[in-house]
Image (tube, grey):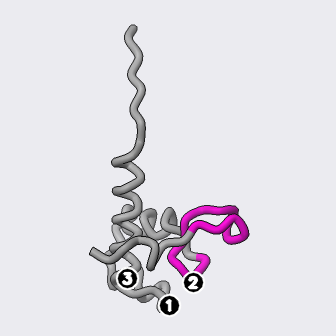
Amino acid sequence: MENLHNRVEINSSIIFGKPVIKGTRITIESTLDELAAGYNIPEVLKAHPNLNEADIYAALQYASSVLKNEKIYTTTA
């Protein structure tokens, strides 16, 4: 799988530092929201003609990597 650094960037001067598809102002968050809302990849690409399929997969891969590194804290009652 392609290195995320080629497709995803975090820059404090772009959308307050939210992760975006490199070279765009399209956030990973908004891309995932569209997929979660039921839009398929061709529909997302039609809405954002400057994206390609590899960008969508990079967004999914980024989200997966963030969740893998998330720390879970449990409490006992």
Judged from the image, the secondary structure of the residue bearing numbered disc 1 is loop
Q: Which mark is residue 23?
A: 2
Q: Is 63 located above or below residue 44 in the figure?
A: above
Q: Which mark is residue 66?
A: none
Counting from the top left corner in percent of width and height, residue 34 is at 43, 69
Q: Which mark is residue 43?
A: 3
- Quadrant position of residue 16: bottom right
Q: Count the marks: how many?
A: 3
- The residue under label 3 is which amino acid type? Glu
- Whichever of callouts 3 and 2 sits on the residue coming sooner in the sequence is 2
**Callout 3–callout 1 Cβ contact below 8 Å:** no
Residue beneath the point at 34% across and 83% down = 53
Residue beneath the point at 39% across and 8% down = 77
Instruction: Please report the bounds of the magenta region as a residue range.
Output: 10-25
- Whichever of callouts 1 and 2 sits on the residue coming sooner in the sequence is 2
Residue beneath the point at 37% across and 62% down = 36
Q: Nearer the viewer, residue 74 or 6?
A: 6
Judged from the image, the secondary structure of the residue bearing numbered disc 2 is loop
- Whichever of callouts 3 and 1 sits on the residue coming sooner in the sequence is 3
Residue beneath the point at 57% across and 83% down = 23
Q: Which mark is residue 50?
A: 1
Q: Is residue 22 magenta?
A: yes
Q: Is 65 located above or below residue 49 in the figure?
A: above
Judged from the image, the secondary structure of the residue bearing numbered disc 3 is helix
- The residue under label 2 is which amino acid type? Gly
Q: Quadrant of the N terminus?
A: bottom left
**Callout 1–callout 2 Cβ contact below 8 Å:** yes
Residue furthest to the right in view is 13
